[in-house]
Image (cartoon, rainbow, N blue to C red):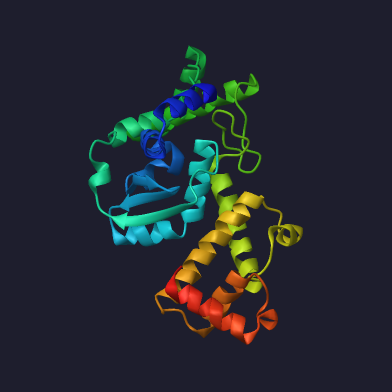
C-alpha cells in the first residue's frame, strides 16, 4: 500500500496537488485520527507548507484544542507515516461539516470490525437466569447484551485472537499494544513533565532531558516547538510579562539568562517583537 501511495504522489506531481491529496486523505479518516467526539467540532480545511489549518465550530473548542495541538500533530503524523505536519493553525467556522460523513457512519467506521462469536443456547439461558431478578425488562436485556459481548470477547482472548491492555485490562483493537485511552493518558502525562522541565531549563536539549524524562526525540521537538510558538507569539503581540519575555529569549538563545549578554538579549527581543 505504501508503494502504491508513493507512485500516486509521484504522478500527482506538484506540492500543491500533493497537499490536496494528503488533505483529502486526512479528511477521509479524520475521526480515526483524532477521535469521533473531537471530529464533530473540528476538521482540516487547508494544508500548506506543512502547516495544517483546522476549522473549529466554536471558540470554546478552539481554546480546548490549543492544549492538545502537539498531540494532534503526533497522531496525524503517525497516520501519515512521516513528520509531514509541523504545525497546526485554528480558525473558527463550520464549513468543514459540509459533505462530511454522518456521525452514524463515522461511528460505524471507527468501531472494531472484529466479529464477536455468539453464545451457545446454554450460555444465553444461564445469563437470563442470572439476571432474572431484575424486574425492568429493558434494563435486564441491556445488561444481558453487555454480558454476551464480554463473554464473546473473553472467548476470543482465550483463543489468542485478541489481547488485553497491560495497563487497564481493556480488550485491544487491531495491532495496539496499549489501549487508546491509556496511551492518550500516558502522552498527556509525558507532555506535562516535558513542559515543566522546559520551563525550568528553557535551553535544555533532548539528549539532556532524556536522562531525566525518557521520551522520544520527536515528542520532545513537537512539545518544544509548541512552547516556542506560544511565547514567541506573546512577545510579538506585546502581551508577555517580564518573566515570559525572559523565558522566550532563553528559548530562542538556547542558553541560560546568565550566559546571554545584554546586547544579545536586546537583539533577540527586537527579533521576536518583529515576529520574523
Residue placed most toward the observer, 3 or 159:
3
In the image, farthest residue toward the top: 121
Residue 225 placed where, x, y %? 54, 60
Q: Is residue 135 visible?
A: no
Q: Residue at x 58, y 25 (%)?
A: 154
Residue placed most toward the observer, 219 or 35:
219
Apparent side of residue 68 relative to residue 187 in the rendered image (left or right): left
Residue placed most toward the observer, 40 or 122:
40
Q: Residue at x 43, y 53 (%)?
A: 88
Residue 3 placed where, x, y %? 54, 23
Residue 4 placed where, x, y %? 49, 21
Quadrant for residue 89, please give it.
Answer: bottom left
Apparent side of residue 119 relative to residue 255 in the rendered image (left or right): left
Quadrant for residue 90, please give it.
Answer: bottom left
Residue placed most toward the observer, 248 or 180:
248
Apparent side of residue 80 relative to residue 92 in the rendered image (left or right): right
Q: Residue at x 28, y 53 (%)?
A: 57
Residue 194 placed where, x, y %? 63, 62
Total number of numbered labels?
0
Q: In the image, is residue 148 above or below residue 252?
A: above
In the image, farthest residue toward the right: 211
Q: In the image, is residue 211 above or below residue 135?
A: below
Q: Is residue 185 visible?
A: yes
Q: In the image, is residue 264 above or below residue 118?
A: below
Amino acid at each position: 500500500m505504501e508503494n502504491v501511495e508513493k507512485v500516486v504522489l509521484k504522478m500527482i506531481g506538484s506540492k500543491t496537488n500533493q497537499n490536496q491529496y494528503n488533505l483529502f486523505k486526512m479528511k477521509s479518516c479524520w475521526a480515526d485520527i483524532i477521535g469521533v467526539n473531537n471530529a464533530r467540532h473540528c476538521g482540516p480545511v487547508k494544508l500548506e507548507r506543512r502547516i495544517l489549518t483546522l476549522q473549529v465550530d466554536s471558540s470554546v473548542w478552539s481554546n480546548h484544542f490549543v492544549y492538545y495541538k502537539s498531540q494532534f500533530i503526533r497522531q496525524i503524523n503517525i497516520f501519515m507515516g512521516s513528520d509531514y505536519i509541523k504545525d497546526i493553525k485554528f480558525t473558527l467556522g463550520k464549513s468543514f461539516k459540509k459533505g462530511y460523513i454522518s456521525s452514524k457512519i463515522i461511528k460505524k467506521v471507527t468501531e472494531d470490525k472484529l466479529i464477536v462469536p455468539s453464545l451457545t443456547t446454554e450460555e444465553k439461558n444461564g445469563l437470563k437466569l442470572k439476571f432474572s431478578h431484575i424486574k425492568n425488562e429493558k434494563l435486564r436485556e441491556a445488561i444481558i447484551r453487555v454480558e454476551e459481548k464480554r463473554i464473546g470477547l473473553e472467548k476470543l482472548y482465550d483463543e489468542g485472537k485478541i489481547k488485553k491492555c497491560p495497563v487497564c485490562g481493556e480488550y485491544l483493537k487491531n495491532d495496539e499494544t496499549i489501549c487508546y485511552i491509556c496511551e492518550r493518558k500516558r502522552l498527556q502525562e509525558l507532555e506535562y513533565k516535558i513542559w515543566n522541565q522546559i520551563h525550568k531549563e528553557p535551553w535544555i536539549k533532548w539528549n539532556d532531558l532524556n536522562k531525566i524524562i525518557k521520551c522520544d526525540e520527536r515528542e520532545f521537538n513537537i512539545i518544544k516547538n509548541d512552547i516556542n510558538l506560544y511565547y514567541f507569539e506573546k512577545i510579538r503581540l506585546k502581551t508577555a510579562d517580564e518573566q515570559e519575555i525572559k523565558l522566550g529569549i532563553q528559548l530562542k538563545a538556547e542558553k541560560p539568562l546568565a550566559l546571554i549578554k545584554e546586547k544579545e538579549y536586546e537583539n533577540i527581543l527586537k527579533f521576536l517583537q518583529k515576529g520574523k
